[in-house]
Image: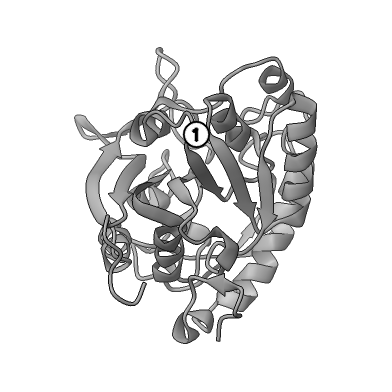
């Protein structure tokens, strides 16, 4: 049973297959990544010096979906070491970042101090958010590499919904489940389930942020969800899905398998068209709380 000071996981969800095992293994991985990201000269995802110099790291997709955040309370789930969280603060939001990695949160607090920006950072499993965060936010944001790390997508969505004030919005931008099935582009190999949520045990080496970094294999547990399962989970949590989009181009390819076009963007060619790489979802919490919430 969930502890009295957290929410998001009911008894059945707390014992979902792979949850406890995945949490420990995945936290160890992300503790390690939090120590590495933004520290190498060839890092393709986290340019800390540019950020400290004022560079905006947020992409247009999440900024458009979130709208004007100035003066709003914003909760950033899976905040890692806080660079995007702090850029929301630069846009005028009062920000709180949550991550299950204590190493990441320590780095986020240090980065906030170096940048001279105000932010709160909390160590927590996003499937069991602290009760203190309930109904405290106008916007909840989670982006890029989110739900594949979540054993119980329903619990995750319930937590996001409960963190929102009535009328608040969830902004979720993530890797498209169809793209996640692909192991390699040339030759084309698909080796990952499309949906179902069953635990997948995967050994990872290196890091998406810097292909030059070499590490020993690290065990992880990941979970595949279809677009239908994701949208259904948001609706089941009481939110109204007002926008769902699929995106065929992206500024970066953290999986390092896609060709890069002359315009600098990555696409997934298929026949005479392109397959989606990312999806984005915006959902709104009811203005009148539902019964039992």
- Res 42 → quadrant: top right
Of residues 132 and 253, which is closer to you in this image?
A: 132
Q: Count every numbered label the image shows and give the total.
A: 1
Image quadrant containing the C terminus: bottom left
x, y (%) of residue 236?
A: 28, 68
Residue 237 x, y percent position in the rendering: 33, 66
Q: Secondary structure at mark 1?
A: loop
Whether residue 179 is situated above or below residue 233 in the rendered picture = above
Judge the density around disc 1: few (<14), some (14-19), many (≥20) Cα neighbours within 10 Å: some
x 63%, y 69%: residue: 23
Residue pictured at 42% horizontal, 54% vertical? 164
Instruction: Residue at 40%, 13% (x, y): give it.
Output: 263
Q: Residue 41 placed where, x, y %?
A: 76, 23
Q: Is residue 217 left or right of residue 97?
A: right
Looking at the rendering, in which quadrant would you find the N terminus?
A: bottom right
Q: Residue furthest left?
A: 272
Q: Pick the residue in front: 137 or 197.
A: 137
Q: Is residue 35 left or right of residue 268?
A: right
Determine if residue 219 is in view. no
Describe the colour scheme in one phrase. one colour
Q: For the point 56% across and 21% down, which residue is it?
A: 56
Label 1 belongs to which residue?
Answer: 253
């Amino acid at each position: 049973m969930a502890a009295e000071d957290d929410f998001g996981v009911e008894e059945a969800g707390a014992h979902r297959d792979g949850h406890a095992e995945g949490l420990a293994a995945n936290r160890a991985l992300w503790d390690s990544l939090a120590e590495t990201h933004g520290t190498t000269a060839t890092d393709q995802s986290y340019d800390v010096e540019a950020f400290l110099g004022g560079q905006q790291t947020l992409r247009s997709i999440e900024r458009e979906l979130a709208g004007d955040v100035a003066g709003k309370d914003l909760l950033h789930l899976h905040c890692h070491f806080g660079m995007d969280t702090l850029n929301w603060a630069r846009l005028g939001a009062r920000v709180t970042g949550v991550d299950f990695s204590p190493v990441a949160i320590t780095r986020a607090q240090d980065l906030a101090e170096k940048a001279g920006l105000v932010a709160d950072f909390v160590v927590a499993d996003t499937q069991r958010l602290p009760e203190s965060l309930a109904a405290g936010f106008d916007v909840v944001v989670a982006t890029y590499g989110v739900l594949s790390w979540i054993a119980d997508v329903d619990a995750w969505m319930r937590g996001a919904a409960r963190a929102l004030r009535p009328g608040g919005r969830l902004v979720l931008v993530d890797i498209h489940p169809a793209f996640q099935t692909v192991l390699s582009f040339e030759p084309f190999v698909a080796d990952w389930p499309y949906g179902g949520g069953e635990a997948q045990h995967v050994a990872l080496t290196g890091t998406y942020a810097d292909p030059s970094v070499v590490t020993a294999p690290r065990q992880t547990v990941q979970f595949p969800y279809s677009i239908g399962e994701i949208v259904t989970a948001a609706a089941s949590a009481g939110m109204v899905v007002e926008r769902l989009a699929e995106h065929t181009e992206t500024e970066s390819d953290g999986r390092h398998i896609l060709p890069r076009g002359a315009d600098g963007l990555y696409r997934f060619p298929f026949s005479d068209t392109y397959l989606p790489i990312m999806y984005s979802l915006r959902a709104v919490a009811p203005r009148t709380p539902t019964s039992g919430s």
